[in-house]
Amino acid sequence: MAAAKLLLVDDDETILLTLDIILRKHGFDVTIAATVTEALKRISSEVFDVLLSDLHMPGPGDGLTVVSAMRHANPKAVTILLSSFPQMDAAAQAILLQTDEILVKPMDVNMLVDAIKQRLAAGPTRVRIVESVATILERSTESTISDWYELVEKEESLMAIPMTFQLRSGHLPQVFLDLVLRLRSSKILGTKEIFSEAATEHGTTRRRQGYTAAMMVEESRMLQVSVFNTLQKNLANIDFSVVLIGVMTIADEIDSQLAQAMKSYLAESVVDALPA
């Protein structure tokens, strides 16, 4: 089978040359371009199976320009964009242009090669599934909780209190139900928080388990990180028309639940301090 012809576009010479060598070693027939102009010339004169392009480049045009040209000249080619700092408006345009993948740099080389091969096997995308933030969190609850637990396991202060996975994470399924409900509601940001019985119970439970207030805050911070990592992994499927308000709502709801948990935590502390 002939090697897949791949056009690699990046203004960073080090990345360009390094990926050129790596991709050739993995069996790709690589053509490189350091500018959008050079890439467009290549696209107009050659046939490619894959486009792998940086999204952000100096000068006229960017990765989206290259994607558009490739779609027009080589409609059967799969298109993959690389971005160090994904911008919401740019990513939204990439989706509209039917870019097949948006990958975030830095990325493990083996993962990149696997992503290219998987996309080649699947072929170019013509119909993309676009999902709301709520839907993504709803279907990714279990994996997000797993990601959160991995972060917790690396935090010595939290792991100093021995606890099973269930005891440590048992409150999170309800948190995600509340997040999804909040995202699908019309509640305005900054309005009075909705009472959460689960958050109140969580604060009391954590006090009895021996958590400090600082540990509660750190645990909540890790939850936000895990949720946002989940959204990052699903960047290509997000409905960008509502993503900003979705991210703000997530932060607001998690902070609201932390505030309610801390309130019950402190109330339990007062009870503990009362004379027997």
Image (cartoon, rainbow, N blue to C red):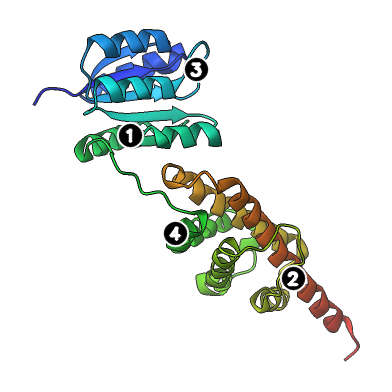
Secondary structure found at label 2:
helix
Secondary structure found at label 1:
helix
Q: Residue at x 48, y 47 (%)?
A: 239
Residue 110 bears which disc, if any?
1
Q: CA distance from mark 2 to mark 4?
A: 25 Å
Provide the residue designation for mark 4.
140
- Under mark 3, the amino acid is Met
Provide the residue designation for mark 2.
260
Which label sits in the foreground, 1 or 2?
A: 2
Q: CA distance from mark 2 to mark 3?
A: 46 Å
Q: Residue at x 38, y 32 (%)?
A: 97
Q: Is 209 on the left-hand or right-hand side of 180?
A: right
Q: Residue at x 54, y 37 (%)?
A: 88
User: Badge 4 local density, few (<14 within 10 Å), some, or many (20+)?
Assistant: some
- Under mark 1, the amino acid is Asn
Quadrant of the snapshot with the N terminus:
top left
